[in-house]
Amino acid sequence: MPDIVLATLNAKYIHASFGLRYLMANLGGLRDRACMAEFVINQQPLEIVEAILAREPRIVGFGVYIWNVEQTTEVVALLKRIRPELIVILGGPEVSYETEGQAIVALADYVITGEADIKFPEVCRVLLSDTGTPACGVSEGRKECLPHIIAAELPALAQLASPYELYADEDLKNRVIYVEASRGCPFTCEFCLSSLDIPVRAFPLEAFLSSMQRLMDRGATQFKFVDRTFNLHLPTSTAILQFFLDRWREGLFLHFEMVPDRLPEQLRGLIRQFPPGAVQFEVGIQTFDDATSKNISRRQNLDRLADNFRFLREETGVHIHADLIVGLPGEGIESFGRGFDRLVRLGPQEIQIGILKRLRGTPIVRHDDEYRMIYAPHPPYEILSTRDIPFEQMQRMRRFARYWDIVANSGHFTGTLKLLWQNSASPFAEFLRFSDWLHAKLGRTHQIALHVTAQALFDFLVNEAALDRDLVATTLEADWHRTPSREALNLRGGVRSKPEVGRAAARQSRHARESKLH
């Protein structure tokens, strides 16, 4: 039985834990005394506890994040109730800041703040050693002890063991494979934890590319880079793109987070060569309002951003996933709407509308009094109201974001979507009107079947927007034939449109097919 269990609760099965694999890879001589145990947040806590205790560990290390802290707190409480002598060590962003008053921190024996790749094995060696510094918080009567909160120094990335061999064959086939060429972010956006990670530190490029080669040799085809600013350092960005371009094969998919206003010609030349849908750029715009950008210490050149979007949409097959945030200090619904309309005109395939979260440790709290920022007290700590967006209007925007994801980002209704604002200068105003109408009709934002959404779009466009019935039906039916649903669509009172039956495609594929048709 292992002495150490490394555990976390992933949001979904497809999300393989990158952090656990880093910890496991860097355990050194303790590695053969450890194992990983990954769970998902919708599992029963008692089942998770049973699985952990069945391994009879002396130490359990948990990765704690904003999406799993509540469930992990329950698991830790049960573990300590059943086996009080079990040593529980926490790490991760949710417990790296503002630890005072956190229930899960009070339950645990130790908390390692910051990047724990090296510090975690150091602590474990002490706790498992008969001659090392004794532990406290486990039993009484010990004279020396480790502190409850242990700050980890930033590790030298060149000294870290690679985690990539710890992706199992099953992971490569069925899960998201996370990789990173760097850590940190050069920007100071006040809502983001990455703004605290200055400066940017890079992994040795040759060793990193060798790891990518080994993953590809094992059959990996989808790589999600977690670097916050992939295109910041031009030599590294070009080397990575060239590496994958030289080894291109069918099914390869690359995801990068990029700085939206930095895309020099050297990168453009490489990006042009990738086939449509092979590359996705996640572009964090967050706001187009200058005053709001200053409030959150965000810098970006909007003219360059617009030119880069034009290039990506007109000259490449890159899939663009762009982010905007509702509830930033100083921005109201009108300002957000203007930014939304501006982004729609730039043409990204997906617009992710996020509701501002107050992450522990971020300096955005300095605006709380002036802008009356009120956040939910429980994870994910979403904004409830601001000076500029009262609670009722914030709820309205939550619905807008949810319905936008269902209708627009899903890729199921790419043709029909354009009908919503074909007679209006403001896509935001028209979709908000649809959102209000849909909520009044359904009274819910989740568990909405695809055919219900299609019928609602038809009813709204014909009865509320007064568009031609046949035009709406024809457009919706064309969209429907590109969906993976087996259901028939009945729009015109008896005329049933049977979609093609096939394997469900990713959102990116549906957007790509729509681009080819238009």
Image: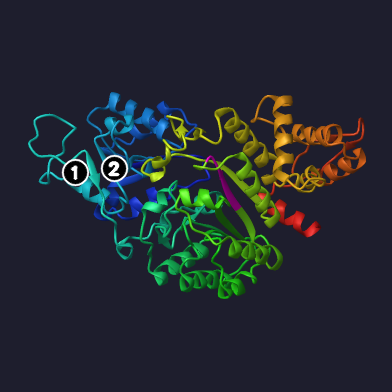
Quarter of the image where the C terminus is located: bottom right
Q: Residue at x 28, y 53 (%)?
A: 27
Q: Quick one: 439 or 159, which is closer to the camera?
A: 439
Magenta stretch secondary structure, dominant:
strand
Determine which residue is flagged by label 1: 128
Q: Is residue 110 visible?
A: yes
Structural crowding at the residue carrying mark 1, measured as other residues with C-alpha within 10 Å and reported as few (<14), some (14–19) or many (≥20): some
Label annotation for residue 4: 2
Q: Is residue 243 magenta?
A: no
Q: Quadrant of residue 60?
A: top left
Residue 2 in view, yes or no = no
Amino acid type of the residue that numbered disc 2 sits on in the rendered structure: Ile
Spot occupied by residue 235 in the image (x, y as percentages of width and height): 47, 74
Q: Secondary structure at mark 1?
A: helix
In x, y percent, where is residue 68?
43, 36
Query: What's the amino acid at mark 1?
Result: Leu
Estimate the x, y position of residue 213 in percent, counting from the top left.
Answer: 48, 67
